[in-house]
Image (cartoon, rainbow, N blue to C red):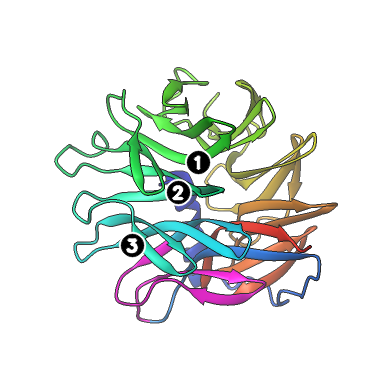
């Protein structure tokens, strides 16, 4: 999975336990213009995490307390809600899973292990990207970037120490999968790999999106000594962060010529996380760092900017910078926005 993003969520979870900072208390308001879906998991007391999503603030559970599960991606087409993620089996091995209108489907066998990280639906085709694991290979070397088309796995080989597929986008007949290969940022186009960053270990691409002939990506690089949020347009990189603080990206959204990227910034000790997003490279802070927070996903409707994330151990949503609570027992990793007709 997105190891940097998971690290941020762990810190935020710990921060909610040990911090006495003020928690968000404004509940999600009704919005007549759009339907908002945010997804992740809920944390029942003394129970396993349960995969879930919220539609306009109303909780819909997908898993149950017998097994740990989580949603990492969500897509909505018409009346159908698709979610992708994983379920842990009895041996605590993650199994890539997707749900359509609540019906669960495993994408791989329940022995080797796998995780789904992104989902795109076009017509009758469901594309899901993620990672397949080979438990017979030493740590990392058995990881293989994979995408599934209507449940059939397409593995993306040609690696030495492992690869992971974090995001997927479709443009006509072209399938783009973004992630890492041998610990470097990588993009596969119809299975052919390209590495926009060379010589920087631990770089990655966490999001890819297409607009016409243009391919946009968001990820993280280490140009100096700290992780730095980075954006690419057609392979040309632009640093979003700077060398004075750590910064990480989580998602990307396009609107005309505008490019929005969500993520976090951190102090040099990485123990103060602030939820942020960038619009055309300009940093916009959603929190001030006084409490642990992250921005997990971003969506645009007209002049409104929606960002989902987590703050003080609460699942939250920002609309144009104003925060609302979605759940006091939930953790969010993704979102989808559907304008109402």
Give the image location of residue 201, x and y in percent: 42, 26
Q: Nearer the viewer, residue 292 or 40?
A: 40
Residue located beneath label 2 in the image: 117
> What residue sits 46% from the left and 41% below the top?
166
Circle 1 sits in a helix, a strand or a loop, which is it? strand
**Is 217 a magenta residue?**
no
Judge from the rendering whether residue 248 lies leftward or rightward of residue 242; answer left or right.
Answer: left
Image quarter of residue 308: bottom right
Q: Label 1, on which residue?
A: 167
N-term mark: 3 or 1: 3
Residue 9 appears anywhere in the view: yes
Q: Is residue 58 magenta?
A: yes
Q: For this rendering, which residue is in front, 108 or 139?
A: 108
Q: In the picture shown, does residue 94 fall above or below 193?
A: below
Place of residue 90 in the rendered image (x, y in percent of width and height, measured from the top left): 20, 66
Instruction: Name the residue: 41% across, 81% down.
Output: 45
* Range of residues picked out in magenta: 46-70
Where residue 282 sits, quadrant-wise, is: top right
Q: Nearer the viewer, residue 23 or 156?
A: 156
- The answer to whether residue 328 of the structure is visible from this angle is no
Residue 106 pos. (x, y %)? 32, 58
For the view shown, which residue lies furthest in the front direction? 124
Are the two marked residues, 2 and 1, in contact with CB atoms closer than 8 angstroms?
yes
The image shows residue 41, relative to residue 155, as above or below, that is below
| Quadrant, the C terminus | bottom right
Q: CA distance from mark 3 to mark 1?
A: 19 Å
């Amino acid at each position: 999975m997105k190891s940097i993003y998971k690290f941020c969520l762990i810190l935020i979870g710990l921060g909610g336990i040990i911090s006495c900072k003020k928690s968000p208390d404004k509940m999600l308001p009704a919005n007549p213009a759009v339907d908002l879906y945010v997804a992740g998991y809920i944390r029942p007391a003394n129970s396993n995490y349960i995969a879930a999503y919220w539609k306009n603030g109303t909780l819909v559970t997908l898993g149950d307390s017998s097994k740990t599960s989580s949603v990492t991606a969500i897509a909505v087409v018409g009346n159908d809600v698709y979610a992708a993620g994983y379920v842990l089996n009895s041996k605590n091995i993650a199994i890539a899973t997707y749900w359509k209108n609540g019906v669960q489907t495993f994408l791989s066998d329940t022995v080797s292990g796998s995780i789904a990280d992104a989902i795109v639906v076009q017509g009758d085709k469901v594309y899901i990207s993620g990672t397949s694991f080979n438990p017979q290979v030493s740590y990392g070397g058995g990881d293989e970037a994979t995408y599934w088309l209507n449940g059939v796995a397409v593995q993306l080989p040609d690696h030495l120490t492992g690869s992971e597929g974090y995001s997927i986008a479709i443009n006509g007949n072209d399938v783009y999968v973004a992630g890492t290969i041998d610990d470097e940022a990588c993009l596969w186009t119809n299975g052919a790999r390209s590495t926009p960053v060379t010589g920087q270990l631990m770089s990655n691409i966490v999001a890819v999106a297409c607009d016409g002939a243009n391919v946009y990506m968001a990820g993280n690089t280490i140009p100096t000594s700290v992780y730095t949020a980075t954006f690419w347009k057609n392979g040309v990189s632009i640093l979003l962060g700077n060398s004075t603080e750590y910064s990480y990206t989580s998602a990307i959204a396009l609107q005309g010529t505008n490019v929005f990227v969500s993520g976090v910034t951190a102090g040099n000790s990485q123990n103060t996380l602030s939820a942020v997003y960038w619009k055309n490279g300009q940093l916009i802070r959603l929190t001030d760092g006084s409490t642990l927070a992250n921005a997990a996903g971003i969506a645009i409707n007209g002049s409104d900017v929606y960002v989902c994330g987590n703050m003080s151990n609460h699942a939250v949503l920002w609309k144009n910078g104003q925060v609302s609570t979605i759940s006091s027992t939930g953790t969010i990793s993704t979102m989808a926005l559907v304008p109402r007709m």
